Structure formats: structure tokens, C-alpha cells
Image (spheres, helix red, strand yellow):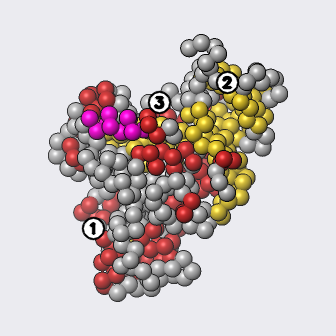
């Protein structure tokens, strides 16, 4: 590329936080031709002629955020989300890359589907898409996918997420094969014999609503089994959306025994407890469910002590019909707690789709951990960029010169209110509507190109 054709951007005066380079201070950052060219103390880089200048005093300048767990519903469910809308939502949330789970239609278990996802993402000019391959064909749990072929096609993580892998022998084989390819397997841990189609955490709230309960044993049993498998095989595993105290204790114990295990939590599992279901109904219903106050406290401890490696939104867009919002209208209201549901409403609630959107609220909710002094800013960057990059085997998660200029500029103190009507996502299913948050992505750059600029969004 000729020098003239290279665009240059100078981001100056911001607090650059790059744990991989042990940098945390006021620096200028020079981007040329899509790559990071230099990171120098603030005020020392003069803008070249024609360079775009982003003044960032008071802002954090961090390696682009990476979400290791999202559902983009494409191919198959354009009424919920498309790759284009999902990647625009990601960019608006400060993410430069997201790992798109395989439970689409068709399931991403073939190189052709992976190629479709990559091509759609290329056309979107937003965040990058990292394809996640299914572990079993059709997510049916019976037959292994051709992992080497999927890795060649571009998959960088393997998961049947949405479904557990029930067959222990098959899972052991999958762990070994995926581990030999030097990738990780991400596990949705649910013993369906114990979760019993539970709609809400087992306990008082489930009883009060008159809906089936989802026990923490349903999660712990599978985590216990799979940690034992991982210790036996030596293969790396990743545990998705950990939600209980017991799960974290199991992970700590397995690490002491040498398991190569990483884990993620979602902002809703540390930001809400099971009582939120009483007000938000289906928009606070997900798998695993919101848990008890004690579990939320345990997740805060796990974030603070390093047991939890990373934050994942588990962005799960759904249209109102899939959430059965009409069928339960009148029973849930953000203004007061619901009481027992009549049997038909309880059935409709229980059958409503699981999951909430998260890409545009994840950073704001995660920043609460920093504002409450549970963790520092550098640790947040590790959890939202460096650790997910390592899980996905991406050369990312750092601002070191020579790497792609995937950068997020964050105003950590901007006060804003969650307004689902303004989401870039096609879906609105969130229990955080109206919530006041502090901190937001101002700009998202992918390979040096601005893919989101809050200042250019119509107010
Ligand atoms: Zn899951």
C-alpha cells in the first residue's frame, strides 16, 4: 500500500489502558493503514497533515472489546436479528468482535454456513464476527462435526450453546479433538433431567409465580462432570454463563487439580437477581435463570478474586411473539411485583423463549463493577478484551504497535438511560429498560475505521 493511500488517525490525550502491554496512563495513539503504529506519552505525537484527530481527554482508550458469546440469529431468524443488525449493535456497545453462536437455522455445523456468516459480516462494516462451530451436527448431540474442516473455514470456538452435550463419551472425544486443534470448547452446562424446563430459579420466586423451578444442581452436576473430563483429557474447556456459587467453587477446586478451564459471567447474572422476574416477566427469563442474592454475591466475589475470566453478554434477541408477551400481558409490570399466575399464564410464561439482548448494555453494566470498586479499570479491560481474545485465539486484546487497530474509546462517566427503542439490535427484550447507567462507548474502531461514533448518532 502506498503511503498516500494510508489513512492516519491520532487519538490523543486519553487514558490508554492496555494490560497486555502493562500500560495505564495518558498516552497518544497513532493509527496508520489500519494498524497501531505508535503509543507514546500524551502530548508527544504531533498530528501529520491530513490525519484525523480524536481528542480523548477524560476517556479511556482500550483494546477493542470482545464478546465471546452472542446469538445473531442469522441465518434463520431475521425477525429477531441479522448479522448486520447484530454487528451494528455490537459496535454501538463498544465491541470490535463478537463470537456468534451456532444455534442458527441451519445450524453452523458446515463450512458453507460459516462462509455465509463471514461474508455477511464483511458486508456489514461494523464489528468483526468470529464464527462458533457446533460441537454436534444440528446440535442434536449425536454426531461430531468435522472440527478440522470448521477450523479451516474460520471457526475459532466450538459450542452447542443453547443445548448441553448430554453424551459424556461423545463430549470427551470432542474435547480431545478440539483440544488437538488448539481451540477451546464452550460448554452450556445443564442437566435437563434436573432443570425440568424450569422457567425461574428454583425457590420462593418460582413457587410464588407457580412455575417450574430450575435448580442450581442442574448446572453444578454438569460442571462437575465436565471438569472431571477436562482434568482427564488435559484439553482446554470454557464454561459459559456461570450463574451460581456452587459452580464457582467447583471451578476453583478443579483449577487446583490442574484443569485448563476458563469461565464467563453475564452482566445480568451479576446485575440482577431472581426477583427481577417478578417485574419483568419473560424479559427477565433466560437459561440459566437469574439466581439468588447469595449467588449474585458469589459472582461479585468471583469477579474480584479472578475466578471469573471474562464477561459475555449472551446477547439473545427475541421478538415479542417468541417471548409470549401478549399472553402474559397484565401480569408483569416494572412498577410492582407479580403474584401467582393463573395456570394458563404460567404455562405461557414457562414456554416463552429464553434470553435477553445485551450487546448495548453490557459495557454500562460491567462498568458498575468498577464504579463500585469491585475491580479496577485494567481488570475490566482484561475481562472484556484480553481474556476473550485468548479464548478465541485472536491476535487482539492489546494496543501493542503492529497489531490491528481495533480500539474502543469509552467515556467511563457519561450518564445515560437504557432506552430499548434506540437499540441498533432488532430486538428489545431487556429487563434494563429505564435503568440509569454511568459509562458508555463513544467510538469503536475496527482496523482503524470508525464503525460507531456516538457523536454522530442523531440525538
Ligand atoms: Zn447457553
Label the magenta part by its dominant secondary structure.
helix
Q: Is residue 452 left or right of residue 122?
A: right
Residue at the outermost top position? 2
* Residue topped by disc 2: 8
Question: 320 or 187: which is nearer to us?
Answer: 320
Q: Say which element carries label 2.
A: strand
Residue at the outermost left position? 142
Q: Quadrant of the C terminus?
A: bottom right
How many numbered marks appear?
3
* Nearer-N-terminus badge (2/1): 2
Q: Nearer the viewer, mark 2 or mark 3?
A: 2
Q: Is residue 62 above or below residue 339?
A: above
* Residue topped by disc 3: 394
* Nearer-N-terminus badge (2/3): 2
Q: Is residue 383 above or below residue 268?
A: above
Question: 421 or 193: which is nearer to us?
Answer: 421
Distance CA(mark 3)–CA(mark 1)? 37 Å
Distance CA(mark 2)–CA(mark 1)? 56 Å
Check contact, mark 2 vs mark 3: CB within 8 A. Answer: no
Query: Mark 3 packing: few (<14 Cα in 10 Å), some, or many (20+)?
Result: few
Q: Is residue 166 left or right of residue 38?
A: left
- Is residue 115 within the magenta segment? yes
Residue 196's disc is 1
- Image coordinates of residue 401 in percent, x first then y, are 63, 21
The image quadrant that residue 197 belongs to is bottom left
- Image coordinates of residue 76 in percent, x first then y, are 30, 51
Residue at figure coordinates x 59%, y 63% from the top left: 419
Amino acid at each position: 500500500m502506498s503511503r498516500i493511500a494510508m489513512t492516519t488517525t491520532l487519538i490523543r490525550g486519553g487514558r490508554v489502558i492496555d494490560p497486555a502491554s502493562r500500560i495505564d496512563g495518558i498516552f497518544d495513539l497513532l493509527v496508520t493503514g489500519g494498524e497501531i503504529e505508535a503509543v507514546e506519552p500524551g502530548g508527544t505525537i504531533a498530528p501529520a497533515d491530513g490525519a484525523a484527530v480524536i481528542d480523548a481527554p477524560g476517556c479511556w482508550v482500550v483494546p477493542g472489546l470482545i464478546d465471546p458469546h452472542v446469538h445473531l440469529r442469522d441465518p434463520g431468524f431475521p425477525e429477531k436479528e441479522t448479522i448486520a443488525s447484530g454487528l451494528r449493535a455490537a459496535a454501538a456497545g463498544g465491541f470490535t468482535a463478537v463470537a456468534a453462536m451456532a444455534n442458527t437455522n441451519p445450524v453452523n455445523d458446515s463450512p458453507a454456513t460459516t462462509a455465509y456468516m463471514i461474508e455477511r459480516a464483511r458486508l456489514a462494516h461494523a464489528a468483526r464476527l468470529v464464527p462458533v462451530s457446533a460441537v454436534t451436527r444440528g446440535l442434536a448431540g449425536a454426531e461430531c462435526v468435522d472440527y478440522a474442516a470448521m477450523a479451516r473455514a474460520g471457526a475459532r470456538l466450538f459450542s452447542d450453546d443453547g443445548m448441553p452435550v448430554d453424551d459424556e463419551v461423545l463430549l470427551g472425544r470432542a474435547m480431545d479433538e478440539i483440544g488437538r486443534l488448539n481451540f477451546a470448547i464452550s460448554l452450556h452446562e445443564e442437566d435437563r433431567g434436573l432443570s425440568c424446563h424450569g422457567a425461574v430459579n428454583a425457590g420462593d420466586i418460582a413457587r410464588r409465580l407457580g412455575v417450574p423451578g430450575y435448580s442450581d444442581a442442574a448446572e453444578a452436576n454438569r460442571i462437575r462432570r465436565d471438569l472431571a473430563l477436562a482434568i482427564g483429557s488435559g484439553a482446554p474447556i470454557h464454561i459459559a454463563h456461570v450463574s451460581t456459587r456452587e459452580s464457582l467453587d467447583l471451578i476453583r477446586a478443579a483449577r487446583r487439580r490442574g484443569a485448563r478451564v476458563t469461565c464467563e459471567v453475564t452482566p445480568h447474572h451479576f446485575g440482577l437477581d431472581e426477583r427481577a422476574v417478578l417485574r419483568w416477566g419473560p424479559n427477565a427469563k433466560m437459561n440459566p435463570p437469574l439466581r439468588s442474592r447469595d449467588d449474585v454475591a458469589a459472582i461479585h466475589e468471583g469477579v474480584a478474586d479472578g475466578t471469573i475470566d471474562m464477561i459475555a453478554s449472551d446477547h439473545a434477541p427475541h421478538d415479542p411473539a417468541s417471548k409470549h408477551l401478549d399472553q402474559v400481558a397484565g401480569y408483569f409490570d416494572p412498577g410492582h411485583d407479580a403474584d401467582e399466575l393463573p395456570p394458563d399464564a404460567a404455562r405461557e410464561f414457562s414456554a416463552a423463549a429464553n434470553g435477553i439482548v445485551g450487546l448495548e448494555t453490557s459495557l454500562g453494566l460491567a462498568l458498575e463493577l468498577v464504579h463500585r470498586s469491585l475491580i479496577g479499570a485494567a481488570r475490566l479491560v482484561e475481562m472484556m478484551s484480553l481474556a476473550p481474545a485468548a479464548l478465541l485465539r485472536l491476535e487482539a486484546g492489546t494496543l501493542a504497535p503492529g497489531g490491528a487497530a481495533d480500539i474502543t474509546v469509552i467515556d467511563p462517566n457519561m450518564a445515560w438511560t437504557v432506552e430499548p427503542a434506540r437499540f441498533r439490535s432488532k430486538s428489545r427484550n431487556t429487563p434494563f429498560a429505564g435503568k440509569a447507567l454511568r459509562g458508555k462507548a463513544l467510538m469503536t474502531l475496527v482496523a482503524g475505521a470508525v464503525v460507531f461514533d456516538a457523536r454522530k448518532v442523531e440525538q
